[in-house]
Image (cartoon, rainbow, N blue to C red):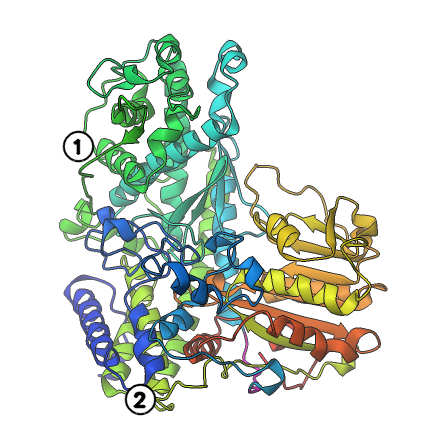
């Protein structure tokens, strides 16, 4: 009997019942938490069954995933934006008070948009909205926690997602229209395409087509691709749609525009899902060729209609366009914006492209244009652009046809589950349209087998840790649902994305149930739960501590400010210290330049006093690193402060940086900075926070370590207890990096803070 209970639940009615029961338990517990006497629990429970970055629900179908917004207008906004529904109602002085939770310099509160780090941690914000006072203990007074937990699942998830991206890129090396790459162990596939290469030289010369036109066309192409790959996934019996959303760390697949390219987060999906992208990207390449070959023909977009393009002040240029691509790159707005920019600037229009592409590729819509599916998608979009007499331009689409890729799974409807038999990486007919040689196919098969082994081990370890936590659940119902759901965490589960989503929500419920035992009174206690870590690393001549901030950008800003304040007390605006940037997160240089006093950007790596580097930078221009990267001390020999963005770095990569720092003569302080929202919570996307891990040499700035960390702690007001308790749950799962896991290769038998 026991053996039967431990059998995986991956298909049919047993799977459906398990998922439905888990969802019902989550909803019931959320209702209970919503009236809890404990303000911390009551406020944080609003994040159950939702994520911080929401996708449009037009293709949610029967997935039941928490990433989908309840209302169309709530989709597409990231948690760092004041357009997000959590904070969209906060205006005026109330908005300033919210920003005050993050920054202390009142002069800066109005200087930057919210996506530059001024929106606080979500649970802290929700607590603040109750109207209570907010106080935080100083860093030195905050509680300390000692832990030697590993980061096994954190590393395994990054490795699997990075290797899956490399597999897809490797299968597509021969493409000529698209450039598909995987760079810097960044856990996403990058797709580059420059539509300007299809424009005539005469048109480029006369119209001076800017990057904005290119970037907008890439956004259009990404939306067209989403419909294509979701149609391909449905054909293969997969149940999870790829959606457009900005955060790349979620366990479910997503895409986001990155200037002239787009980023594909394949999520924690089985290897067969990577095959869907290999097939779809090859089809996209062919569709681009068909589109290119049709550009010698006049476009068929109707200009002369009520509120048509004929109303534009740029009508002569629009009429002169020789083909549909030239039309898309022609100015239409009085401000000079290109037609393609005007057409794709809202999420609703992107959904329209996605939906049309899906139905087209599923055979529900006939493609009669000689330019193929891309031409058909582009024409359908441009036909929706309206120009009023006052020159205002809009793309108004009243109804976007929905779709459900699980319902499109005809094989499952017939009683079979192709995805369930493909967890080993074997995908019937996967190479039929690839033109691959037998040897290449064998290599691909070996790659899929390796990915299947990685994925199976990840789910096995996840299941083990999840069941261990279930055993300590305070509520019998929660314990039962976690134990039952654990049986669905298997590669053969075609709804694995739903199972992982529910597992993350049950982990949140487990956290809230632990917090029910805390004092229900919030006055004077905000932020006091923040940890400080003091690992004993004297054996390697270093000391380290950690502090949590509201988001990754705050960690970068605070680290730079503290380095200038403590390590360079003689720095002034008249005599600033130099700071070099090596592939930083795209907003970093602008924000640091404005936010941090007494520093100036420098292109001279050899003489820089401080440097900021993302060791897993997102390469959005197709130009990845070549050759072996030099040692950081050789690149930045004079730098006292090293600020390393480790958001997508494994603990081994962090350890390598730590050892380089140890041996660097001039370096005094190492900051390992990360955005915890992305990769440190199993793709849950519920707890936005930033981490700064500070290491100093005992013979150098070690004596100033607490002072440096204090300078960081002063920048933020502290985070709500839920932010820390939930992070502790993630540590118990092995989902978050710890100082122990970073330095354990060199330090044995040492208790360390995480």
Instruction: Provide the secondary structure element on which disc 2 rests.
Output: loop
Establish if 2 lies above or below 493: below
Task: Mark 1 vs mark 2: give the one in front.
Answer: 2
Observer-nearest of 465 and 535: 535
Main SS, magenta residues: loop
**Residue 365 appears at what percent x and percent y?**
18, 29
Q: CA distance from mark 1 to mark 2?
A: 50 Å
Mark toward the start of the polypeptide (1 vs 2): 1
Looking at the image, residue 419 sits to the left or right of residue 729; the answer is left
Looking at the image, residue 351 sits to the left or right of residue 141; the answer is left
Residue 744 makes an appearance in the image: no
As drawn, the label of residue 24 is none
**Residue 86 appears at what percent x and percent y?**
33, 62
Residue 41 makes an appearance in the image: yes
**Residue 621 appears at what percent x and percent y?**
57, 37
Looking at the image, residue 454 sits to the left or right of residue 37; the answer is right
As drawn, the label of residue 364 is 1
**From the image, which quarter does the N terminus lie in?**
bottom left
Q: Residue at x 31, y 28 (%)?
A: 393
Q: Residue at x 52, y 15 (%)?
A: 204
Instruction: Provide the secondary structure element on which disc 1 rests.
Output: loop
Establish if 203 lies above or below 277: above
Observer-nearest of 336 and 300: 336
Looking at the image, residue 125 sits to the left or right of residue 50; the answer is right
Q: Quadrant of residue 348?
A: top left
Please state the extent of the stretch shown in magenta in the rendering. 143-150
As drawn, the label of residue 474 is 2
**From the image, which quarter does the C terminus lie in?**
bottom right
């Amino acid at each position: 009997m026991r053996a039967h209970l431990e059998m995986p639940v991956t298909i049919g009615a047993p799977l459906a019942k398990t998922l439905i029961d888990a969802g019902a338990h989550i909803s019931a517990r959320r209702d209970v938490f919503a009236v809890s006497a404990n303000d911390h629990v009551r406020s944080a429970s609003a994040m159950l069954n939702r994520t911080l970055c929401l996708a449009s629900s037009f293709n949610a179908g029967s997935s039941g995933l928490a990433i989908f917004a309840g209302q169309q207008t709530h989709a597409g906004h990231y948690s760092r934006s004041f357009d997000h529904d959590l904070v969209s109602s906060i205006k005026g002085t109330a908005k300033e008070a919210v920003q005050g939770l993050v920054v202390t310099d009142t002069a800066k509160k109005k200087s930057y948009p919210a996506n530059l780090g001024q929106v606080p941690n979500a649970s802290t914000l929700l607590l603040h909205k109750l109207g209570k006072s907010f106080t935080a203990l100083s860093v030195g007074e905050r509680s300390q926690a000692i832990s030697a937990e590993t980061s096994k699942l954190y590393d395994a998830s990054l490795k699997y997602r990075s290797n899956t991206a490399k597999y897809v890129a490797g299968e597509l090396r021969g493409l000529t229209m698209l450039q598909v790459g995987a760079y810097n162990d960044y856990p996403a596939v990058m797709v580059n395409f420059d539509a300007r290469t299809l424009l005539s030289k005469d048109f480029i010369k006369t119209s001076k087509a800017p990057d904005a036109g290119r970037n907008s066309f890439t956004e259009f192409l990404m939306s067209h691709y989403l419909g294509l790959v979701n149609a391909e996934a449905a054909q293969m019996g997969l149940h999870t749609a790829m959606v457009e959303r900005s955060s790349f760390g979620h366990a479910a697949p997503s895409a986001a525009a990155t200037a002239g390219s787009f980023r594909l987060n394949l999520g924690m999906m089985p290897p067969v899902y990577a095959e869907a992208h290999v097939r779809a990207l090859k089809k996209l390449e062919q569709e681009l060729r068909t589109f290119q070959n049709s550009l010698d023909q006049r476009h068929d977009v109707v200009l002369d209609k009520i509120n048509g393009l004929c109303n534009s002040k740029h009508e002569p240029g629009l009429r002169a366009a020789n083909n549909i691509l030239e039309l898309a790159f022609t100015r239409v707005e009085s401000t000079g914006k290109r037609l393609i920019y005007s057409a794709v600037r809202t999420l609703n229009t992107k959904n329209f492209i996605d939906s049309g592409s899906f139905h087209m590729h599923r055979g529900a819509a006939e493609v009669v244009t000689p330019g193929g599916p891309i031409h058909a998608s582009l024409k359908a979009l441009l036909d929706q652009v309206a120009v009023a007499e006052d020159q205002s331009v809009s793309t108004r689409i009243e109804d976007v046809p929905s779709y459900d890729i699980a319902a499109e799974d005809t094989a499952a409807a017939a009683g079979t589950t192709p995805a369930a038999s493909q967890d080993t990486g074997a995908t019937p007919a996967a190479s039929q349209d690839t033109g691959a040689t037998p040897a290449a196919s064998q290599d691909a098969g070996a790659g899929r087998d390796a990915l299947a082994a990685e994925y199976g081990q990840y789910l096995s370890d996840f299941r083990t840790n999840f069941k261990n936590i279930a055993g300590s659940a305070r509520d019998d119902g929660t314990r039962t649902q976690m134990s039952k759901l654990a049986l669905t965490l298997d590669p053969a589960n075609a709804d694995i994305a739903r199972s992982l989503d529910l597992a993350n929500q049950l982990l949140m419920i487990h956290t809230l149930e632990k917090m029910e035992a805390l004092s229900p009174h919030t006055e004077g206690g905000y932020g006091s739960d923040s940890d400080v870590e003091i690992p004993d690393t004297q054996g390697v001549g270093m000391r380290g501590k950690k502090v949590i901030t509201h988001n990754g950008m705050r960690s970068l800003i605070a680290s730079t400010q503290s380095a200038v304040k403590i390590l360079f007390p003689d720095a002034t605006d008249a005599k600033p210290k130099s700071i070099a940037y090596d592939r930083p997160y795209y907003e970093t240089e602008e924000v640091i330049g404005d936010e941090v006093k007494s520093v100036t950007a420098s292109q001279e790596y050899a003489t820089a006093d401080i440097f900021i580097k993302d060791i897993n930078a997102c390469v959005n221009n197709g130009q990845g690193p070549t050759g072996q990267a030099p040692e950081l001390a050789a690149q930045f020999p004079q730098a006292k402060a090293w600020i390393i963005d480790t958001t997508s770095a494994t603990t081994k990569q962090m350890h390598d940086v730590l050892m380089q720092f140890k041996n660097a003569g001039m370096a005094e302080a190492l900051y390992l900075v990360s955005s915890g929202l992305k990769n440190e919570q199993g793709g849950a996307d519920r707890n936005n926070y930033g981490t700064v891990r500070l290491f100093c040499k005992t013979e150098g700035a070690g004596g100033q370590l607490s002072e440096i960390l204090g300078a960081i702690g002063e920048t933020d007001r502290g985070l709500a207890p839920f932010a820390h308790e939930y992070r502790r749950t993630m540590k118990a799962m092995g989902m978050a990096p710890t100082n122990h896991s970073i330095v354990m290769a060199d330090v044995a038998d040492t208790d360390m803070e995480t």
